Image (cartoon, rainbow, N blue to C red):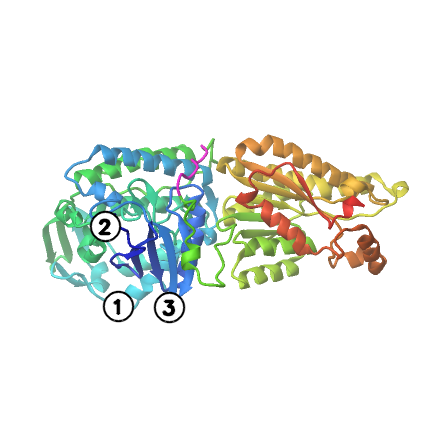
């Protein structure tokens, strides 16, 4: 019997600024990725978490800081020399049945997720790395071109690019004109506009080396809400020009494990028949014949007909995509005015979780380094976020990895301070103000949150008021106000957000009730009635939404010490004494106790808990 080595390390490969190394560790196949950029490592981790909910991705077993950078340990998918990537299906003499099947799976997966998550988003909240940031001042356009001059095509057209605007271009007999400086200005102006961008959850950089065979997605630092036209153009341009010709020509080391790429470069290299300058007429003549191998042509055609055109027909009806251009260059899609109609639910990812017997953090994480956060990639909306309970809940969800929308009534200063606290601690949060008792205001707030963060996965419905009126003095106005704040506002938010959760087959709704809904108390008839109704709403929604993968639970706090207590209780010290006399646990509750319960109910671990009221009261209800 031949024993297998406990550790085997393969060759290190460099891809742009990252290093990749295959490792076999205790019988498990891992791919280690090393990056020096901490921001890029964070983007990769969060992008993987977002993508894993909708697409097939290899498991990210762990990540940790190491000297000089970050190390990420992924499940290593099957592969080898000229195997394991879409690139390898394209490096053949003709289209194969494997390529046709692959493109069917790829376009079907994209179509489901894009139609589910598509949204006309504010450009500030779309992934900006590949386009906006490169066009911004100080970005790659400036790095490469600002204040620089160079020959248009060394050895072919020896004219400085700064003088290109003084020449006419005749490309295959057609007259063109290009002003390089004006083009750069146009790009910057275009990406500086605030016009909404149709975006959806995608990988963001869908090149043929970032797509595995069998189908899975690699490289996640651009994953998130990406421009839909940008995603399409990226794949089409890379498949038709960059991947088969320019990248292997100018970056051959990236293809060391896929040498068949170089065999097929001639089939994808344009034939330049003429490159001449007529100085007398200031004309540059270029005649060329484009080339695209049969497998790449088949892939581009399938992508266009099975993804671009169907998505355009659904999202922008009345603006049909034309037939695929002869040279496989897509037109620029324009968003229409119509909404999204009847999106299909995304398929559940069939890979991306941990292997049940492998716990690589035990092997790779040094003492004191935390496990990946349980809510990485989730997006939460917390109402009443500036109150004592709401702020604790928001901080806890953010600390657990969620991106948090902080909904508040009119407390801009407290919202700004809470947002700064969360972002300063390495989390992500935005603040939104609205009167959630008003249906239109609640709807607008939900749309704002979706526009800026994408679909909301977790709703913590915490907003409310604590109006005290003796029963004899309770007017219809008092009654209506108590129900509007403590019951109707919860209905409005849940009703607005459950459609996206249903489409995603996953959601968490957590309402914040009160133990008084069970026990009762004088002067609080409206408040207690609303809280009892909230428990009923929780059970009704749990029954109705459970088949869609949405759990609905209520957390009922007991005696929790919050700053607002001082404004509604005449003698806080005496109240504390009374509470402790009834409780089993001899201390006052803290907002963090409620936040911990909410955070647990928001996780995948609580997926079999629904329709429940969890009393967090130190045993007060036992009397």
Q: Which mark is residue 91?
A: none
Between the residue at mark 3 and the residue at mark 2, the CA separation in whole angstroms equals 32 Å
Residue 236 spot, x, y in % from top left: 28, 44
Q: Is residue 295 visible?
A: yes
Task: Give the image location of residue 128, x and y in percent.
Answer: 41, 55
Q: Residues within 10 Å of mark 2 (few under 14, many from 20)?
A: some
For label 3, the crowd category at 10 Å Cα-Cα, with few meaning under 14, some 14 to 19 and many 20 or more, is few
- The answer to whether mark 3 and mark 2 are in CB contact below 8 A is no
Q: What is the span of residues highlighted in magenta in the rendered image?
A: 344-351
Q: Residue at x 16, y 63 (%)?
A: 159
Pointer 2 residue:
242
Residue located 56% across and 48% down the image = 380
Q: Give the residue number, with chain letter if any, for mark 3.
A: 68
Q: Which residue is mark 1?
A: 148
Residue 186 visible in the snapshot = no
Residue 160 on the magenta segment: no
């Amino acid at each position: 019997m031949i024993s297998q080595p406990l550790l085997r390390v393969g060759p290190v490969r460099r891809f742009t600024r990252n290093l990749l190394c295959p490792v076999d560790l205790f019988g498990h196949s891992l791919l280690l990725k090393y990056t020096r950029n901490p921001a890029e490592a964070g983007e990769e981790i969060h992008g993987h978490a977002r993508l894993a909910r909708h697409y097939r991705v290899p498991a990210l077993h762990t990540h940790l800081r190491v000297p000089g950078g970050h190390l990420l340990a992924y499940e290593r998918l099957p592969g080898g020399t000229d195997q394991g990537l879409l690139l390898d299906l394209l490096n053949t003499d003709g289209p194969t049945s494997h390529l046709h099947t692959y493109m069917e799976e790829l376009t079907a997966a994209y179509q489901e997720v894009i139609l589910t998550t598509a949204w006309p988003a504010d450009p500030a909240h779309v992934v900006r790395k590949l386009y906006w940031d490169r066009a911004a001042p100080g970005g790659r356009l400036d790095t490469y071109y600002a204040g620089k001059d160079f020959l248009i095509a060394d050895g072919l057209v020896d004219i400085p690019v700064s003088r290109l605007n003084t020449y006419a271009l005749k490309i295959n007999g057609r007259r063109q004109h290009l002003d390089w400086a004006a083009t750069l200005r146009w790009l910057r102006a275009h990406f500086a506009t605030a016009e909404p961008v149709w975006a959806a959850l995608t990988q963001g950089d869908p090149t043929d080396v970032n797509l595995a065979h069998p189908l899975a997605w690699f490289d996640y630092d651009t994953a998130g809400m990406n421009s839909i036209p940008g995603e399409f153009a990226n794949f089409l341009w890379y498949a038709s020009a960059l991947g088969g010709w320019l990248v292997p020509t100018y970056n051959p080391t990236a293809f060391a494990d896929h040498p068949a790429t170089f065999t097929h470069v001639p089939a994808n290299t344009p034939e330049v028949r003429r490159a001449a300058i007529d100085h007398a007429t200031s004309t540059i003549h270029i005649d060329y014949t484009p080339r695209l191998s049969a497998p790449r042509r088949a892939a581009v055609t399938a992508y266009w007909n099975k993804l671009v055109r169907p998505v355009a027909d659904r999202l922008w009806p009345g603006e049909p995509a034309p037939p695929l251009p002869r040279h496989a260059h897509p037109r620029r899609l324009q968003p229409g005015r119509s909404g999204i109609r009847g999106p299909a639910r995304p398929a559940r990812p069939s890979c991306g979780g941990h292997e049940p017997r492998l716990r690589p953090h035990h092997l790779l994480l040094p003492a004191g380094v935390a496990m990946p956060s349980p809510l990485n990639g989730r997006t939460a909306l917390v109402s009443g976020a500036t109150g004592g309970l709401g702020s604790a809940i928001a901080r806890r969800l953010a600390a657990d990895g969620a991106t948090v929308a902080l909904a508040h009534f009119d407390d801009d200063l407290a919202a700004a301070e809470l947002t700064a606290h969360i972002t300063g601690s390495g989390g992500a949060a935005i603040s939104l103000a609205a009167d959630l008792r008003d249906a239109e205001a609640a709807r607008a707030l939900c749309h704002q949150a979706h526009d800026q963060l994408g679909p909301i996965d977790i709703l913590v419905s915490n907003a409310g008021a604590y109006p005290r009126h003796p029963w004899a003095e309770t007017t219809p106005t008092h009654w209506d106000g108590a129900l509007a704040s403590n019951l109707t506002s919860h209905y409005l938010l849940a009703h607005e957000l459950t459609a996206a959760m249903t489409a995603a087959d996953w959601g968490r709704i957590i309402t914040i009730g009160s133990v008084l809904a069970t026990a009762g108390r004088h002067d609080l008839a409206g408040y207690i009635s609303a809280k009892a109704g909230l428990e009923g709403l929780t059970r009704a929604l749990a029954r109705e939404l459970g088949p869609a993968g949405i759990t609905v639970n209520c957390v009922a706090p007991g005696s929790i010490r919050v700053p607002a207590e001082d404004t509604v209780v005449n003698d806080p010290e005496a109240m504390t004494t009374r509470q402790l006399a009834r409780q089993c646990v001899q201390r006052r509750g803290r907002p963090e106790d409620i936040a911990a319960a909410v955070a647990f109910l928001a996780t995948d671990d609580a997926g079999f808990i629904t329709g429940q009221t969890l009393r967090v009261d130190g045993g007060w209800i036992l009397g």
